[in-house]
Amino acid sequence: MSGEHYFSEQPTGEFKPKKIVTSINGSRVELFTAGSTFSPDHMDTGTAILLEHADNAPNSGNLLDLGCGWGAIALTLASRCPESIVWAIDVNERALELTRMNAKKLGLTNIRAVHADEVPSDIEFTGIWSNPPIRVGKEALHSILKQWLPRLAAECEAYLVVSKDLGADSLLKWMQTEFADLESERIETAKGFRILRSARI
């Protein structure tokens, strides 16, 4: 990718959508992906592990997919929770376009794939789900989480999946210190990934 990353805002390579077969909410489906996005060849292991907890998502209110990539999390949540609105955000314009294409392909009308500044500022989220962009660096990652976790509604939960080798345990300690009004804990370890849950009680 010539130094380009999946968190580049405007990937410079030609946009060439390709199709993969994957599972969304228990159904095998054909979806669009492309280069210069996160895990373009398949649903990555961390996301698949995170989505094992998708049955905890409430079928109401506004859900957030933070760093949506080509849309695996948003598509699953929108399918499982048809009465909710799923906000899928990413800095990568290509990722947003793929999420829109995949939502249309699956007939999901309750996904809003937008940039962060397009999310109305008065929205609170009844659930936040993320395979966060760890490789943006600690400072940038902390800034992202400080922007969005405080918008978790009362009695609602956020779920993050983070590789143990990429600092999941230190991130959890930081969350427990930074967000004193949230209860943050590790709820699962599988295949080298941690599932972290933050709950506003």
Image: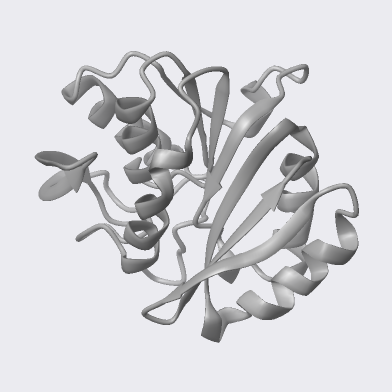
Side (left or right) of 26 relative to 35: left
Quarter of the rendering containing residue 175: bottom right
Residue 97 in the image, given as x and y percentages of width and height: 35, 32
Residue 28 in the image, given as x and y percentages of width and height: 9, 43
Relative to residue 63, is residue 104 depicted above or below? above
Res 123 visible: yes
| Residue toward you, 50 or 118 | 50
Coloring scheme used: one colour
| Residue toward you, 53 or 103 | 53
Q: How many marks?
A: 0
Image point (32%, 34%), residue name: 75
Instruction: State which quarter of the image contains the N terminus.
Output: bottom left
| Residue toward you, 54 or 18 | 54
Residue 80 in the image, given as x and y percentages of width and height: 33, 29
Side (left or right) of 71 relative to 27: right
Side (left or right) of 23 relative to 138: left
Res 12 visible: no
| Residue toward you, 87 or 178 | 178
Residue furthest out toward the bottom? 165
Image point (72%, 41%), residue name: 148
Relative to residue 20, is residue 64 depicted above or below? above
Instruction: State which quarter of the image contains the C terminus.
Output: top right
Relative to residue 104, is residue 48 depicted above or below? below
Quarter of the rendering containing residue 41: bottom left
Image point (40%, 36%), residue name: 74
